[in-house]
Amino acid sequence: MLGEFKHYKTRLMHGGIHKEVQDILLEHGLEIVAETLTEGLSRVKRCTDEGRALMSLDLQVLINGLQHFVSANVRPKFQIVEAFIKAYYLPETEYVHWARGHPEYTKNQIVGLINLVATMKGWKRKTRLEVLEKIE
């Protein structure tokens, strides 16, 4: 992803675009990367606690790498992704409250997270359905 973003920045620099417009386009590019990562994470069907921790580390590496390509602070753009990764670790009783407090995620993203957590944490089918019903 870092290589692709670097290529994107290079193309903007050599495209005859004003610096101010380049900065705006780079910022939009960061937002698209964050949204795409969140969407991808919401589609994960299986992962372990260790795998989720590695996702978090990978995200930090990505954030630090992207910071070299833009003048703006990258971290705020990726808080949506960080929060989504960390939501995996919430207690079973917190998901309804968490979902209501995070309107930035789509219904499908939240359902994907709930289904993943239910599978990996061994929730009973009834529990999963109750949580999903309360969220909807």
Image: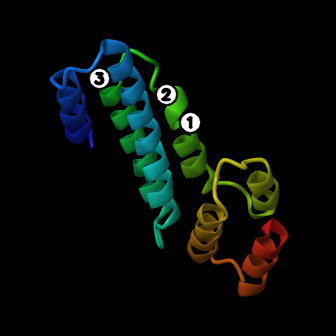
**Label 1 crowding class (10 Å Cα cut-off): few <14, some 14-19, many 20+?**
few
Considering depth in this image, is 110 or 114 the residue closer to the camera? 110
Nearer the observer, disc 2 or disc 3?
Answer: 3
Is residue 34 depicted above or below 114 in this figure? Answer: above
Q: Secondary structure at mark 1?
A: helix
Residue 136 percent across, percent down from the top left = 79, 69
What residue is disc 1 on? 79
Label 2 to label 3, Cα distance in Å? 13 Å
What residue is disc 3 on? 69
Q: Are marks 2 and 3 in contact (CB under 8 Å)?
A: no
Is residue 132 depicted above or below 61 in this figure? Answer: below
Disc sitting over residue 75 in the figure: 2
Relative to 71, is 69 on the left or the right?
left
Considering depth in this image, is 79 or 94 the residue closer to the camera? 79
Q: Which circle's residue, 1 or 3, is located before the other in the chain?
A: 3
Which amino acid lies under the numbered mark 1 shown in the image of this protein? Answer: Gln
| Quadrant where the N terminus is found in the figure | top left
Residue 64 percent across, percent down from the top left = 35, 27
Q: Secondary structure at mark 3?
A: loop
